[in-house]
Image (cartoon, grey):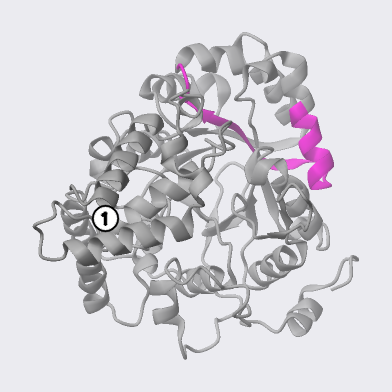
Amino acid sequence: MSDTNINRRDFLRRLGVGAGVTGLALAGCTDRLRQISESTTALPDIPVDRMTLRTNPTTGDKVSILGYGCMRWPTIPSGNDDGEDEMDQETINRLVDTALAHGVNYFDTSPVYCKGRSERATGIALARHPRESYFIATKLSNFAPQTWSREASIEMYRNSFKELQTDYIDYLLLHAIGMGNGMEDFRARFIDNGVLDFLLAEREAGRIRNLGFSYHGDIEVFDWALANHDKYKWDFVQIQLNYMDWKHAKELNPRNTDGEYLYGELAKRGIPAVIMEPLLGGRLSNVPDHIAERLKERSPENSVASWAFRYAGTHPGVLTVLSGMTYMEHLEDNLRTYCPLVPLSDEEMQFLYDTADLMVKYPTVACNDCKYCMPCPYGIDIPAILLHYNKCVNQGNIAENSQSPDYARARRAFLVGYDRSVPKLRQASHCIGCKQCVHHCPQSINIPKELHRIDRYVESLKRETT
């Protein structure tokens, strides 16, 4: 593909719609794609120009119900001595081209995604297409106290324009309000320094077309922001919503708020909802085997993940549903779900709520693989450890004790998989409990506590004392 603008018909012809990635690119991701690959084998081509669109009541934007989350862009080894991967720009371009070809027009990024490289990679890929063909969403991600000053926050905001190669932002979010110390941090980040007033002026000037926020954590902050809706006139709000979190969010994590309440408060005020974590960090695509069987029995031709995406899109107040699609298979499966969306019936909705009641009994860690906790100053791969543990829970590879019938199989599966997915120098045994990661976790996980618990379990398996 050239770096110059090309029209839609030409890039459709040159792209070759529906092509998959190579086997090499998929090496190591078999488990993550298990349900998707089952459902997409030998399926017909994905229809073009069938994407379901939702209308933004403020601007009249026709937004694709599938939004592209740019937090998990693919990387490739850089070959440098530091071992740091680099962005796989060629694959990113191809994913963006395929998405645009099928009507996806909402791209959500942040200055902190992909270790600070997502905005630039996203900007490069999108700038090859007409600006009016897509909507850019990015965030003011001033989490760190050194970015709380008015000057530092505005500098971050203006740098987003440079990285994204644009002179206006379609959807600008105050990033993850409610994290950290709740209202105290929120006021320091946006109110006391005058940054929110600055952003309101930027919206008035047209450099921000829609202003909103994403929410994690302290419900007091969410309620305060909505109580002041008449003053700030939020154009949209991004919330976590899926069929597990609808009624079980607080059971999964005491600091979270049930999706039923969050969505309901937005619907009362007519504020469009942008949905994040429709798969609960991948946990609703890599479900326990008996849950997968339950879903596949009901709809054999569709992937397990498609249930979660249909659920999120069925709510009428949802503007778009974000998905971090690293691989072409992810994108193609979601396109099949949303081109067009077939909303769930009331009976199907209840079927998923019943499924959630079954799933909540499984003690997985509420990690969404967002990587906000990284890098760890001691080199620990926190998300990989927690995801391996969750995978073993889902697959029945957590042995209750050495007398369990499947103890030997579960022990081997856990230990071998642990060493394969997490290098020894990055395993939980190296956690010293500094708690630097805790403040950054949007799910409010007590990460050191979980790492120490998992490490004790690993040691018990090695000694066969479980």
In depth, the one of 42 and 261 nearer the eye is 42
Three-letter code for the amino acid on which mark 1 is drawn? Val
Residue 271 against residue 398 in the figure, above or below: above
User: Does residue 384 show up magenta in the picture?
Assistant: no
The answer to whether residue 318 is left or right of residue 146 is left
Q: Residue at x 41, y 43 (%)?
A: 240
When asked about the image quadrant of residue 20, the answer is: bottom right
Is 162 colored magenta in this rendering? yes
Q: Residue at x 27, y 76 (%)?
A: 296
Residue 282, image x, y percentages: 41, 56
The furthest residue to the top: 192
Position of 172 with respect to 186 (left or right) is right
- Helix, strand or loop at mark 1: helix
Q: Which sits in the foreground, 104 or 88? A: 88
Question: 442 left or right of 129?
Answer: left
Residue 245 visible from this viewpoint: no
Residue for badge 1: 393
At which x and y percent is residue 105?
Answer: 65, 59
Marks counted in the figure total 1
The vertical placement of 277 against 301, above or below, is above
- Measured as percent of width and height from the top left, residue 413 is found at 31, 64
Q: 17 above or below 217?
A: below
Q: Residue at x 55, y 45 (%)?
A: 57
Left of 278 or right of it: where is 363?
left
Q: Residue at x 42, y 40 (%)?
A: 428
Residue 377 percent coordinates (x, y)? 58, 31
Q: Quadrant of the N terminus?
A: bottom right
Can residue 441 be seen by looking at this rendering? yes
Q: Name the image quarter holding residue 174.
A: top right
Answer with the quarter of the image where residue 255 lies.
top left
Report the span colored magenta: 156-181
